[in-house]
Amino acid sequence: MRIKAKLKGDVVKVKVMAKHEMMTYDIAQKKTGSRDNANFITHWDAHVNGKVALDASTSQFLSKNPIIKFEFKASPLGAKKGDKLEMHWVDLKGHTKDGHTKIK
Amino acid sequence: MERRSFLKAGATAAAVMAVAPTLSAVDHRKAQPDAWKAKNVKDAIKALYGTDATVNEKINVKTPDTAANGGAVPVEVKCDGDFESVAILQDTNPESLVIVFDQNEASIPHYQIKIKMKQSGSVYAVAKGKDGKLYMGKKTLNVALGGCEG
């Protein structure tokens, strides 16, 4: 997972790139012969100082190796330059991945 | 309120919480499972928010007019106002709902994501305002090469 976070004024802009196949039910059926092999990221969250900066539930229709760009206000979370932004996702099969970056 | 019904869901919810011990408020896949199975946009909005009465304002959906690759169609959604959640949907894939962003006091409802689209169609963004109304924006585009075929 690659993450970039930049603070400008009171707004933190974040770009997240996850490495994930994002296999839909249809593709799973076609490639492996079983819909049960579908797997995709189902929930994302980002935290700064233990507070939620992003909370997203997703379906199979994000692109392969999905990218999410989002923004949040720094002051409600007390986010400053140098603070750690923690990202976390979980997929349909229960695999999880954590990543973090420093807010620049 | 949604969180309470979510917690009441019991054993399954507890199991899910154990797998993903995050501080997130709502996992919409568990709280509104029907919304993710809905085959058209209207049903998905109804399953997600309880009503499909939408107002066409405040939401701006941006995509290219023609997407060369349906496997990664860039979508930008910008909402103007205070919202509880923002959802992005489309009407070409087997199911409609793509993503639901929960909003808190720090959220800025401006998102850019890449989605799959099977064929030419429309992308919708629906946001539930703090005033209880549903706001919707829409963009129709051409997709040259469908993205769900793999």
Image (spheres, coloured by chain):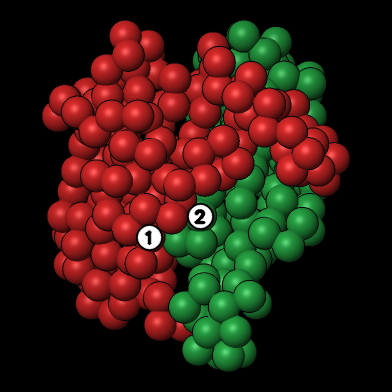
Chain colours: A green, B red
Residue drawn at point x = 43 percent, y = 55 percent: B37
Please give the chain letter of the residue carrying mark 2. A
Q: Quadrant of residue B130?
A: top left
Q: Which mark is residue B112?
A: none
The structure residue drawn at horizontal position 64% and vertical position 19%, both measured from the top left corner, is B4
1 and 2 marks on the same chain: no
Residue type highlighted by circle 1: Glu
Residue A86 seen from this side? no
Q: Is residue A15 above or below residue B129?
A: below
Instruction: Kindly report which numbered mark, 1 or 2, lies closer to the viewer in this rendering.
Output: 1
What residue appears at the point 68 percent right and 57 percent down from the top-left corner?
A91
Of A64 and A8, the residue lying toward us: A64
Q: Is residue B69 left or right of residue A26?
A: left
Residue kind at label 2, given as amino acid type = Ser
Element type at mark 2: loop
Taking A70 as reference, is B134 left or right?
Answer: left
Whether label 1 touches label 2, CB < 8 Å:
yes
Viewer-proximal residue, B32 or A102? Answer: B32
Question: Residue placed farthest to the right in the image?
Answer: B18
Q: What residue would you read off at disc 1?
A: B95
Quadrant into which the N terminus of chain B falls: top right
Residue A89 screen position, x and y as percent:
70, 48
Quarter assignment of residue B9? top right
- Residue B47: horizontal and vertical position, in percent? 38, 39
Q: Secondary structure at mark 1?
A: loop
Instruction: Determine the residue positioned at 46% across, 83% down.
Output: B150
Depth check: A37 or B100 in front? A37
Q: What subunit carries mark 1?
A: B
The residue beneath circle 2 is A59
